[in-house]
Amino acid sequence: MAGLAHASGTAGIFNAIVNLASKGDNIVSARNLYGGSYTQFNDLLPALGIEVRFVDSQDPANFAAAADARTRAFFVETVSNPALEVADLDAIGAHAAESGVPLIVDNTFATPYLNQPLSHGADVVVHSLTKMARRARHGHRRGGHRLRTLRLGGWQAPALRPARHLLPRPALGT
Ligand SMILES: Cc1ncc(COP(=O)(O)O)c(C=O)c1O
């Protein structure tokens, strides 16, 4: 497992996605999301050429049904903010594995104390630390972090590229 800190949860989500998807690709996302994430997905990612296909996450099969060869990830909030839909992570994770794409889970609302999505089929987990960092009230400290399993580097599906931060970086001699 590897972790990465970001300046905000929103930055963590953005980085998780642009490390996997680029112009012409798409992701499949639950339609009930935190408003800032919805704006990012509905307005900002399409402006970068990344399509977001919104589905009703209460039926996990909807994710696989919306996927195609250019799908790079599935995205869901464990407990959606503010609609409070609870995602069946094990089922969505199974569809992600069958479709050959990683499952990104925003676990902010559940918190890592109550739920660990990496044990339930997630490949990448994002938390907005703004919500729960010690002594922080909402919005008084900002932060986000992102966890991922090492499985992410080992996808075998031919349609999938490895995550961008695992690719060679010629400028750094790697
Ligand atoms: C579920 C969820 N994800 C992400 C965010 C965004 O986090 P941040 O404000 O740290 O960018 C929020 C903020 O309210 C949230 O509720």
Image: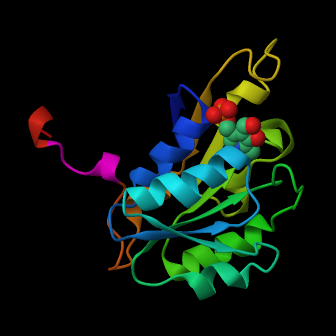
Provide residue 134's location: percent of width, then percent of height. 79, 15
Residue in the picture at 48% in, 76% down: 100
- Colour setting: rainbow
Residue in the picture at 39% in, 61% down: 21
Figure check: 35 above or below 53: above
**In the picture provided, is 27 more to the left or to the right than 49?**
right
View extreme (right): residue: 84
- Residue closer to the observer: 126 or 154: 126
Quarter of the figure with residue 53: bottom right
Q: State which image quarter holds ligand 1.
A: top right
Residue in the picture at 69% in, 16% down: 141
**In the picture provided, is 71 more to the left or to the right than 141?**
left
Residue interval drawn in magenta: 164-169
Figure check: 138 above or below 174: above
Provide residue 109's location: percent of width, then percent of height. 82, 43
Q: Is residue 75 visible?
A: yes
View extreme (bottom): residue: 65
View extreme (top): residue: 135
**In the picture provided, is 135 more to the left or to the right than 118?**
right
Q: Is residue 147 magenta?
A: no
Provide residue 71's location: percent of width, then percent of height. 46, 74
- Residue closer to the observer: 110 or 84: 84
